[in-house]
Amino acid sequence: MVRFLLARPIAVFMTFFALMVFSFIVLRMLPISLLPPIDVPQIVVKVNYPNASPEAIEQNVLSNIREGLITLNGLEEMDSKAGSEVGTIRLTFDYSTQMELAYIDVNEKIDRITNSLPEGLTRPEVIRINTSDIPVARVQVIPKENVDDIEVSLLAENVLKKRIEQLPGVSLVDINGKKDRIITVEPNEAAIRALGMTQQNVISAIQAGNSELPGVSVKDGQFRYYLRLATRVDTPSDIESLPVSAPNGAIIPLGKLAKVSYQAKEMLGYHLFGEKEALVITVHKQAAAKMNELMPELKDALELFREDYPQVDFDLTQDQSNLLNAAISNLQTSLLFGGIFAFGVLFLFMKDYRLPIIIGVSLPSSLLISFLVFYFFDISINIISLSGLALGIGMLIDNAIIVLDNITRKRESGLSLFESCVSGVDEVMSALISSVLTTLSVFVPLVFLSGISGALFYDQAIAVTAILSVSLLVAFVLLPLLYFIFFSRSKKVEESGENPFFQRVLGLYEKGYDLVFENKKVAMSLFSILIPLGLAISLILGTEGLPPIEKTDATLEIDWNEPISASENKDRVVTMMQAMRGQYQKAEADVGVRQFLLFDGENSIQQSLLYFLFEGLEEKNQMLDNLEAYIQENYPGANFKLGDAPNAFDQLFSSNMPFYEVRWKDLTGKEPIPEEKMDPWLSEFPTKKWERGPGLQKEASVVFTLRADRLATYQIPVDQVQEQLSRLFGTFTITDIRRFGEVTPIRLKESEARFEDLLRTTQITGSDSTFYTLGEFVDYRYEDQYKFVTADKGGIYQSVLVTEDNPDQLAPDFIRWGADRNMGVEMVGQYFRDQENIRQLIGILIISVLLLYFILAAQFESFIQPLIVVLTLPLGIGGAFVVLLIAGSSLNVMSAIGLVVMLGIMVNDAILKIDTINRLRKDYVESPEISGTQALEMAIHRAGQIRLKPILMTSITTILALIPIIFSAGLGADLQRPLVFSVIGGLTLGTVTAIYFVPLAYWFFVSKKKLREG
């Protein structure tokens, strides 16, 4: 094949040129994202039920929805949580479920059960979770002094939102912190009573003044006209001029009986930027959009906003494109330094400027053509696929060096230039293909991991497959062609023999080789100790997910654990920020209930999420300590969590699931077990290391009891008292003014007085028109009640979160504890998911090793020789572990990727060395004067010499290209540093040991009986 293609250089050149042109066109079309667009198999159903208790939401709403959704296809888990005024149901599906269809199915089922839900309840929201739903940035909108907050809310909703949505690549714009305008009616109770009227007279007058005649028309000859009542109201002054008829027949303007005015609707949540109230606009990008083009557009739009709307300040926070820019800059750095050092190392070893130029052409070509594969497999340019390309660059350089070195060696042996190119490629072709297949055998099985990990590895596996496949195409076709073109025009006579630098290196290798082969058994014993010893280092290395990144931002999640209002929550947060003033650069807070459409977390009036940005780590750690001390001193009952601000990776991998949760259900009833019964049982729980789950958390509440005896005595209907209570303490909407989609509610103004005072001062009328105090018919008491009602597929449950180091060993005790009290007990949590992932990884690792063995056995036509390659891996892994330990790093995702990069290069060397030994043995054995044993020793020695230069060049080039990352600063460097330590450790300590181990193991593994027979 190589001979045929080399004979047609113009055809080959034009083919590659066409591929690169198409790749360049495709590269401009590929979407650029932070993460691949993965459908997280979860759907959240949110319910807002104002003035409803957790028990009412569970009984009247959530239980009905759960029953309606239980038959969904692919549904694995269903958890619901009812709190005060809000409820959520989280549906988790199997990863094979098509989430588009599941989303439609959930909406259809909710539409069907809407009639069985309480009247007046707004339709439950259905939220589908996707990686593209993570906002790329947050735009802060801060009103200036003396600017109306409601006007700014209208500006954000009607203007800013629409202008941002028009930017190319924006899919959705979400807002939090909006304020709505309402009309409030504050009745003058003294005036109403003096005229012998009640609140109902005022309410009826407003409702009559805002009535409509929908669909009513009159006929006038051949014409038909639709009627519209001209008595509708639009403003507070219109309402105040409405007539109210008194019992004595007098007509009184409503303005004399009540005060009517515009006010801001009571807020259930706020957004703060610094210490000021503000709005936040989150920007979400389309899956196919390019983030690196979207963010400059957004920043330009903000500059225009600052000019067009001087009454408002703007700021941009939590820009997620920094992560992507870090990944792109890392790839650029790897290419730049890789190219520079490859040039220097090749020139040092080969003393010919043309070879580095050939590699300089082949590297970008391979990378560019790889994007063509991205296009056909519908892969975007994201952090995961870029890391796959970075993984392949090491082997790309290795393949190029091996081919060029082998062609040069053939020329030095006396072959013509054309034959050297053909023979040099043919000789290493099968070994290089095996090497690429062995690397892919590690990556491809990872696609079958369940969960998000498997979905993410798909992009990485495609990227690695693309660049390695293209690297083979380039190494077998383009490199020999370029070599032929560059050297065919040269008049210079080639110098035979090695340059002085490499001769000195070879001399050192020879001394080591002689030492090892003079003491074969001692050396083999030493290697036998080194292999398990290197692997044992993993036991003292720490393990974590992503490496610790030096983040200069932090978050505080706080639950005040008190029944406070949203405004009190806001005041506490502002006071806290004032106490920390000057210790942070920027701060923002989402206080209480969040208005975001795509918010899938818990909404609670008593909770707040604060975000802080700092100048450096020292300032951050100092303020976090101060903040913790402040909360513990001023709010000892609050639950809070301080930590690093989550980036898109953290948000994707973070789990709402507790680590180990023990759940139980009462087998005798369908209600939560009352606290007076539950608390003594919990004192006998099998372990003392536990925390209350959501279904056991308590909060103070007020319970009203109607006095039926007095109501009967004074002949006052129960519904009259209930209606008066709802007007006093609820949100009582009289009517709505509707104008072209804009709705302005008219509501009774809620009194700011204490509820005890309201009960004493509010009056209701009896059947004889006598006025009575409301408090005479209503008793109240304070008591602690459960804060949440939790349920799953099987119904209502309560739970505790076990914090033991090894909680599952107590599982039989938990089950026995529940059985003794007639409760069904089950254990759930992240613990079990982690165990399942570990089992899957072990299974995939076994499959990868078997695949690697099968490929090598087919390559070498031997069952023994593949074991030599497999045994070199622990030497590289051990070297990587040593450097990770010295550097104080840990075993994490990035160091694991570094191990794969390093092992790919080491496997490459081992395969080619064994392949060279096999080939040389055949050549030497054909000579009648050389015995089988002599042929073996000569082949082992010569193969070591031949393979020394390529492995040293590859290792040195790769190490030098990565060293700058160690001394760099920033997010990208923090992420890549463990990868660099792994590669450097493996390619220094691992390579030095492997260059002697492979020939020694080959000598021991070959059958001496066959040698004697030979």
Image (cartoon, rainbow, N blue to C red):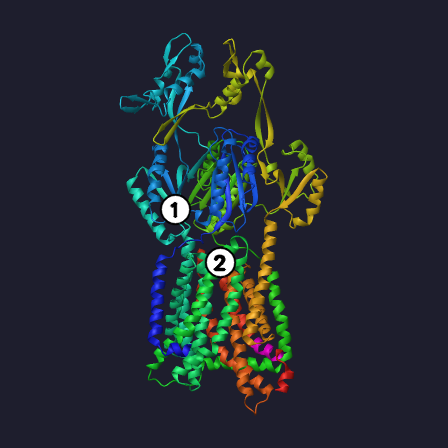
Q: Residues within 10 Å of mark 1 (few under 14, many from 20)?
A: some
Residue 869 pos. (x, y %): 57, 72
The image quarter containing residue 964 is bottom left
The residue where tag 2 is placed is: 458
* Mark count: 2
The span shown in magenta is 996-1004
Q: Nearer the viewer, residue 550 or 1006?
A: 1006
Residue 1002 counted in the magenta span: yes
Most extreme residue toward the right, as rendered?
820
Residue 42 counted in the magenta span: no
What amino acid is found at the position of numbered circle 2 in the picture?
Tyr
The answer to whether 841 is drawn above or below residue 618 in the figure is below
Most extreme residue toward the bottom, as rendered?
929
Q: Residue at x 46, y 47 (%)?
A: 100
Q: Nearer the viewer, residue 996 or 56?
A: 56
Q: Nearer the viewer, residue 132 or 71?
A: 71
Q: Quick check: marks 1 and 2 in contact, CB under 8 Å?
A: no
The residue where tag 1 is placed is: 171
